[in-house]
Image (cartoon, coloured by chain):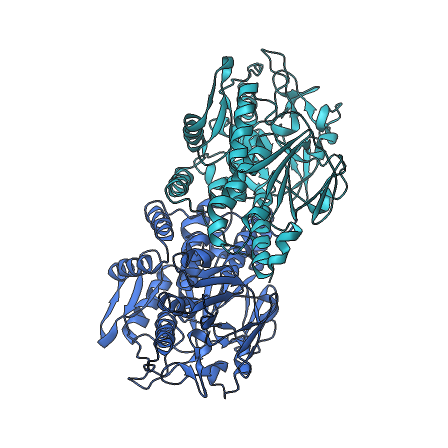
Chain colours: A cyan, B blue
Amino acid sequence: MPDRPKVLVLGGGFGGVGAVKKLKHAEADVILVDKHDYHTFQPLLYQVASDLIETTTVGHQLRDLFRDHDNVTVHEAAVSGIDLENRTVSFEEMDPQPYDHLVIGLGAVVNYFGVPGADEHAFPMYTLPDAVRLRRRILERWEATDRDPSLADDGALNVVVVGAGPTGVESAGAIAELYRSNFSKDFPNLPQDKARVILIEGGDAVLPMFKKGLQTYAKKALEKLSVEVRLGEVVEKIEPTRVHLKSGETIDAHTLVWGAGMLANPLASDLGVELQRGGRVPTELDLSLAGHPEVFVTGDIAWITDAKTKKVLPQLGSVALQAGEHAGENIARRLEGKDTQPFKYLDKGTMATIGPRAAVVQMPRGRSLTGRTAWLSWGAVHLALLSTDEARARALLDWTWGIFTHERAGRIMVDGADK
Amino acid sequence: MPDRPKVLVLGGGFGGVGAVKKLKHAEADVILVDKHDYHTFQPLLYQVASDLIETTTVGHQLRDLFRDHDNVTVHEAAVSGIDLENRTVSFEEMDPQPYDHLVIGLGAVVNYFGVPGADEHAFPMYTLPDAVRLRRRILERWEATDRDPSLADDGALNVVVVGAGPTGVESAGAIAELYRSNFSKDFPNLPQDKARVILIEGGDAVLPMFKKGLQTYAKKALEKLSVEVRLGEVVEKIEPTRVHLKSGETIDAHTLVWGAGMLANPLASDLGVELQRGGRVPTELDLSLAGHPEVFVTGDIAWITDAKTKKVLPQLGSVALQAGEHAGENIARRLEGKDTQPFKYLDKGTMATIGPRAAVVQMPRGRSLTGRTAWLSWGAVHLALLSTDEARARALLDWTWGIFTHERAGRIMVDGADK
């Protein structure tokens, strides 16, 4: 076989996976590299944290996903540098890889905006290990308080969630539901009124990117689950068991979930372009990098301007997936000697779920859904999007089980790391 | 409510869980303490290690198990000492607990028989974290070899399993099946002939406690899965990537699974009786401790003599469960002012599974089963024994899926411990 062009895809998130999918029939060697051996279905991370579903429903083995792609090789390694000049990417644990075409879908890291103590004490919610750590922390604090109930007075069971975007809202709702439906039965001797879930948002509404009516509905739904929604408050400092607000107030809480912001992967600075807000890499209308038609950028690391609306697109899984697919298609076109196409995002609606049966859906052209209908459509959409039949069967089992019994997936702490 | 007698149950394994079950209607406060928040279904641990099933199929939340028991409280804490004189148990993380009746089901720890390097480099298979660590190790070695294929020549993919009892046989068979059915597809570029599974046994047969015909069948079934069965060999020293045998031979292997023996929990030495082989605590015929009719001992920590056959019973899950139930019944009898009863084990058969469709079952009165029938009965028995409906539904889904697709539960490494 003659040497085929080499397409290197960095990152196995929605962007990278979308690109590889569209290269299935390309006459090229496609090499997908991620620092983990799995793809993360990020929209359901909060369900792992609140123990609604298993980690394997949300993490899908990358080799499995592309087993029927003859031209794909998967490696697990962390990128250490991108050399655009020599068309080579270096890795922490692996030899450097040259490329003819490159897809950069390296995502983001959490942005603590310099809040003191956040790096040491906050629990971010961006990766699957993040979600597992948060789940473990919550369980561990309840077990500790079971042994020494006076810890409840110190705020051991309280959880502060920072940021009322989808991550914060979904996490707060799911934790409150876990507290009210399950822990109240698991720990009948503990004071449930000392197990507060407090959502802190600097702005004046939850779910800022949603319409006013949906914001109002979401806030009410959260409060019905006994989440305390605190708008116009900003976190100033975080200590292991205390959260200090700019207003001077101190909240006793041993767990702080950070859902407030992200910063593009720092490797963005290797790309020789002026970065945009949040350190994001601006793309051309065909998703390529300025001056480098062989390089495409997609997902949370990218600053993507929609070719139709000329608006910058938000950092959403649906944008990352569509942009990744488009990047893959553009590379396939180029391999066939054709021109690339500009990227136009197709908005199929944005959803956030608040509790066991409540959700909001903002549809294109101003329509919206709330309540049980929204929740069911949310379930249907996520089931459809899960990558494998097995994951779908698992999620369906977990969810159906949860609806009928209010039971969780496990609520156990298994530590496989310490010996 | 007047002060009721306090029954303290140490350990949430088969023994402790059996005892608590039988105390459901007892007029007593039952306190169950385990160092984890879950009960482990140990017979399926090897399936977690080889990624056939989820951790939550094997680990069941203890609070969940006894939610409909009004008299049960569960705590997560590690026992640090037992004071028979003052009828008090002390814990690492919790205040001491007094008791009127005590059940000791504290299990065992791995016994390396002083083999140098074992403590540092061997992977035991007794607890759920053990199984998770082994799974992670195997996956991690394949990923590392994928990045640097020369590691295969160093034995990175080879697994040595020490001990051909049920733990060793089931682990070796399941790992070999994982290698042949899955990794051969996941890592098509890696040399499968350098991914050996080697079972080392000091005796002259696999499954020593089974009948000769079943031993022969099991050995053949293992070899059909390409497990190399090495009888009459003893491990002398273990290095990170090398296994040294007494015969002078050295095997290149980065992973060594220890299924060769166990030692009763060292807390046994607090009980003031002369310990038996393996540090086990001898019991009276009613499972109580000599001189302490208020203390019962069950499970792997106990040296139990069958009241009917007068033979010492093996350390099996079925013995632990029955003995635990019997201890619970004896405490219930005593609470009602009745005499305790001697314990007679009801042998319902012993099973070991070797591969995806092969198993051996040794039935009472000399009967036995092999092959597909054995495998199906094995599946049925284990499904029936799993503690919750949800775990059953999960296991059934995992197993059915596995049979039809040869797929595994996840094959992903999620680390929630390192930050």
A382 is higher (above) or lower (below) than B180:
above
Residue A266 in sight: yes
Task: Give the x, y percent position of residue B107.
Answer: 48, 72
Task: Give the x, y percent position of residue B406.
Answer: 37, 47
A81 is higher (above) or lower (below) than A280:
below
Task: Give the x, y percent position of residue A23.
Answer: 50, 27
Q: In which quarter of the image is residue B21?
A: bottom left
In this view, the residue in front, B11 or A393, is B11
Q: Give the total number of marks visible in the rendering.
A: 0
In this view, the residue in front, B125 or B160, is B125
A75 is higher (above) or lower (below) than B174:
above
Q: In which quarter of the image is residue B163?
A: bottom left
- Specify whether A384 is left or right of A287: left
Q: Quadrant of residue A393?
A: top left
B184 is higher (above) or lower (below) than A345:
below
Residue A328 in sight: no
Give the residue drawn at x 60%, y 44%: A130
Task: Give the x, y percent position of residue A279.
Answer: 72, 28
Residue at the limit of the structure toward the front, as seen here? B1
- Specify whether A409 is left or right of A205: left
- Specify whether A257 is left or right of B408: right
The quarter in which the C terminus of chain A is drawn is bottom right
Give the residue drawn at x 41%, y 82%: B288
